[in-house]
Image (tube, rainbow, N blue to C red):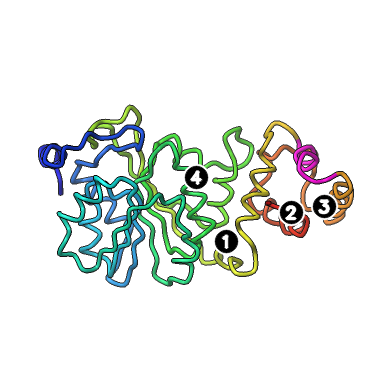
Amino acid sequence: MLDLTATKKILSDFNILPRQSLGQNFLISKSILRRIIEISDISDQSHVLEIGPGLGTLTSALLKCAARVSAYEIDKQMIAVIEQRLKDKMNLALYQQDILQVNLRKLYAEESNLQIVANLPYYISTEIIEKLLIEVPNAESMTLMLQKEAAERISLGPNNSRYGPTAILLKLYGKITDRVRVAPSCFYPQPKVSSQVIKIKRHPQSVLFSTRVKIDLFRFNFFLQQCFAQRRKTIRNNLNNYFKNELLDQITDKIEQSDIVDLKLRPEQIPAEKFWQLYQSVANYIDIN
């Protein structure tokens, strides 16, 4: 475990200045590290996909529990640190890549013991969470460090102005089973906001998991984004802005006949399960190109 003194020394030895643009705040709390390992429930059968390993503090702990760890880090300076610190770890695969540019579905969608552990940069946490839920819904769980406000937002249900696509995808994947509050003092340098570690466990009847082969989840997410494009407008108006005029009447008639949802509702009023049914009724008309 790298405490504050050890973290500062490594940064000095490698001539590294933490980059705010990459959200680099390094964990220095032993108790929080222990809790992350506890709630992630990694076993000796687990293949862990780690995002944002930084200096390798969490990586080192994961390697002691998991069968293997695949870690993705965008910063080449962090890669150099990890390569030196963990060079003897044969169960570590380290990649210098932007996780948003990695085809996770192609690489990991068939994994049966996949678990996600990630320290998400606050400024792109929503994008990464949506990517994980869409591309690797086969993951047994996702243990994520993110900004407290973001953790609260993705936990919301309908009839809340901050409810949106990420919360819907999460609900269709599983549920949050654990939360750990993380104070700014647990990091170096200290962020200006509080953080939270959440564990999202896949539901046994997860819709995203069970239909991942038959349903194009990229198109489903695109559909959600269109529905929330103007969240204060009704679903009918949002669909009207997307679908071509000659299709709109046909689509809305089909939705109304199926009695899935009242098209006069705003998107923030509609439960996740209804969005899934709504998508299935119009999927053949959606073009994401």
Q: Is residue 149 above or below residue 80?
A: above
Residue 249: x and y in percent read: 89, 47
From the viewer's perspective, tell me whether residue 75 is left or right of residue 276.
left
- State the separation of the CA atoms marked 1 and 3: 22 Å
* Marks 1, 4: nearer the viewer: 4
Q: Is residue 192 above or below residue 255?
A: above
Amino acid bearing label 3: Ile
Amino acid bearing label 1: Leu
Tell me if mark 4 has few (under 14), some (14-19) or many (20+) residues whose alpha carbon lies within 10 angstroms of its own.
Answer: few
Work out whether mark 3 precedes mark 4 in sequence or the reverse, and give the earlier one: 4
Q: Which one is nearer the viewer's eye here, 258 or 11?
A: 11
* Label disc, if present, on residue 255 of the rendered structure: 3
* Label disc, if present, on residue 127 of the rendered structure: 4
- State the separation of the CA atoms marked 3 and 4: 29 Å
From the viewer's perspective, tell me whether residue 281 is left or right of residue 288.
right
- State the separation of the CA atoms marked 2 and 1: 18 Å
Q: Name the residue tied to disc 2.
A: 286
Q: Is residue 61 above or below residue 22?
A: below
Residue 170: x and y in percent read: 53, 51
Circles 4, 2 touching at the beta carbon (< 8 Å)? no
Work out whether mark 1 precedes mark 4 in sequence or the reverse, and give the earlier one: 4
Q: Name the residue tied to disc 1.
A: 208
* Marks 3, 4: nearer the viewer: 4
Q: Residue at x 30, y 45 (%)?
A: 75
- State the separation of the CA atoms marked 1 and 4: 17 Å
Work out whether mark 4 precedes mark 2 in sequence or the reverse, and give the earlier one: 4
Q: Which one is nearer the viewer's eye here, 133 or 288?
A: 288
* Marks 3, 2: nearer the viewer: 2
Amino acid bearing label 4: Glu
- State the separation of the CA atoms marked 4 and 2: 21 Å
- State the separation of the CA atoms marked 3 and 2: 14 Å
Segment tinted magenta in the rendering: 234-244
